[in-house]
Image: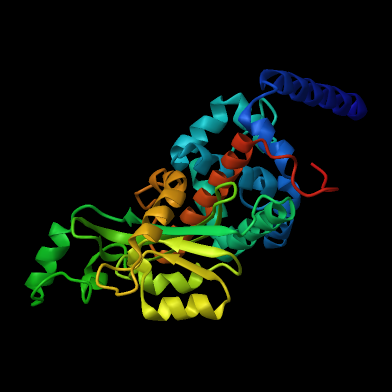
Amino acid sequence: MQKEQKQTQRMIFDSEETLLEKLVSRDHAYRKVRELVSINTLVEPFRKLYSDKGAQGIDVEKGFTAILLQFWEDLSDRQMEKALQENTAMKWFCGFRLTEKTPDHSYFGKLRNRVGTKNLKDLFDRVNELLEAAGLIGGTFTFVDSTGIVSKLALWEERDQAIEDGEKRLDNAVVGKYAADKDARYASKGKNKFWFGYRRQVAVDMGQGIITKAFVDPGNILDLHALKRLIPNQGMIIADKGYSSKENEQRIKGKGIHSGILKKENNKEKNRDLDRWLSKVRMPFENVFSQKQRRARYRGTAKVQLQVTMEALTYNLKRLIKIGSPPLGAGVGA
């Protein structure tokens, strides 16, 4: 009797998998991602984080692919819970059967915390190693730039509390004591852009528009102080004058690469013709930055770094689909 029940269950499972396979179109973007890279291989190091299948008994590959889709589609935890319940393509991509129970919203935060920022960065770097091996990261020109990430739009209550406590103003010297996000800081870019939060720094290889580095700093860390983590190992680095300083020029020269940083107006070595050429070269890649999320999903540098890394990873995967990349990593099973 038990044997017959198991056979019946197996037939139901097989039937569900076949039906779900048919419901997802052959040219769906999720299929293309699965064809591009073996997610199972990429998340293998994460398995050591679990003595069993982890929270809610869900395999780490299913969980991570769900988080990948969460950032791919820009969904909150509750929106992701509902999407997995209702969207057949998402179920298929994550490896859930048609009628299988999917995780609730509380699962995603727990898994993100367990994976952590460092492990996620290691995964991002492994994908980029595959891209480099496939010739999709060339290193001839690297464009770097920053965008603001807003943690909170208004701090009136925090300001009032600071003044009540005897502070003259709510500035970067004291805001960490009052704001809910202790790591966020006031920031500015140019004369007209101000926000409270973080500064996202991104490096883009200009061959195929692939993001090679992405990290965050509190908003008060200036671009010129962040450049040292963005300098590539070869080619030319291109950036706006916010990154310009004698120290950065020395750093770039010390690595044996060329500087394409626009010089400030008061710099005697400024070459306007060269600057115009550099601005024209980088123009097609500026949309990489304009498309990025401008609001912090979470609080704290570590969690915002996780957000930025996931956004960079999903951007790269979408970029690979657009350029028609072949599967990455010869010999890697799907």
Q: Is residue 59 visible?
A: no
Q: Is residue 285 left or right of residue 88?
A: left
Give 221 or 84, whichever is nearer the viewer. 221
On the image, the x and y values in percent for residue 105 come to 49, 42
Give the residue at x 77% y 21%: 18
Give the residue at x 66% y 50%: 136
Q: Is residue 290 left or right of residue 1?
A: left
Q: Residue 49 is drawn in which quadrant?
A: bottom right
As displayed, is residue 223 above or below residue 35?
A: below
As displayed, is residue 170 above or below residue 73?
A: below
On the image, the x and y values in percent for residue 276 come to 37, 54
Pick the quarter of the image with the N terminus. top right
Q: Residue 36 is drawn in which quadrant?
A: top right
As displayed, is residue 289 above or below residue 5?
A: below
Q: Is residue 86 left or right of residue 324?
A: left
Q: What colour scheme was applied to this rendering of the protein?
A: rainbow
On the image, the x and y values in percent for residue 103 come to 57, 40
On the image, the x and y values in percent for residue 312 come to 52, 51
Give the residue at x 71% y 37%: 34
| Count of numbered labels shown in the rendering | 0
Give 216 or 241, whichever is nearer the viewer. 241
Q: Is residue 274 left or right of residue 252?
A: left
